[in-house]
Amino acid sequence: MRNLGRKQLTIELRSAVGELPEVLKPFDLSLSEEGEQITYTYDTNAASTGITALLQAVQSSGLGLKDL
């Protein structure tokens, strides 16, 4: 029941990273073992999913996006 309304957004990076930049830490992201994907879990029932803020933070971090 806890997972109802929860979805994941996977962001593919242009190049692998060893760890997430500090600006992305508040989003509680998961970094793949290869360092090429970031996964964000969000609640679809929440007033705000936080996706817009996340994408702005990714852009300001300097990471290059390959695909969403």
Image (cartoon, rainbow, N blue to C red):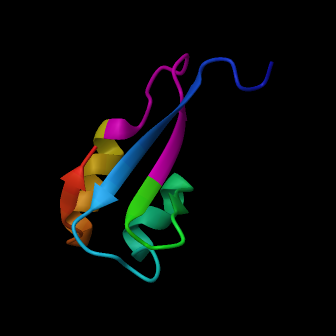
Q: Position of residue 52 (x, y in %)?
A: 29, 38
Residue lying farthest front? Answer: 34
Residue at 20% from the left image edge and 72% from the top image edge: 62
Residue lying furthest right in this view?
A: 1
Residue at screen point 31% across, 56% down: 12
* Nearer to us in this view, 58 or 37: 37
Image side of residue 5 versus residue 22, left or right: right
Image coords of residue 2 (percent x, y): 78, 25
In the image, is residue 50 part of the stretch drawn in magenta? yes
Q: Which image quadrant is residue 5 in?
A: top right
Q: In this view, does 14 lie above or below 48?
A: below
Residue drawn at 48 percent across, 51 percent down? 39
Q: Which residue occupies the foreground of this view, 2 or 49?
A: 2
Picture quarter with the N terminus: top right
Q: Residue at x 37, y 67 (%)?
A: 36
Q: In this view, does 29 lie above or below 50?
A: below
Q: Give the range drawn in magenta.
A: 39-51
Instruction: Indicate the quadrant containing the C terminus: top left, top right, bottom left or bottom right.
Output: top left
In this rendering, the count of numbered labels is 0
Please identify the quarter of the rendering in which residue 50 is found. top left
Q: Is residue 12 left or right of residue 1?
A: left
Above or below, 50 relative to 39:
above
The percent coordinates of residue 8 (x first, y second) are 50, 37
Q: Which x, y percent locates residue 65?
A: 21, 58
- Residue 13 included in the magenta stretch of the image: no
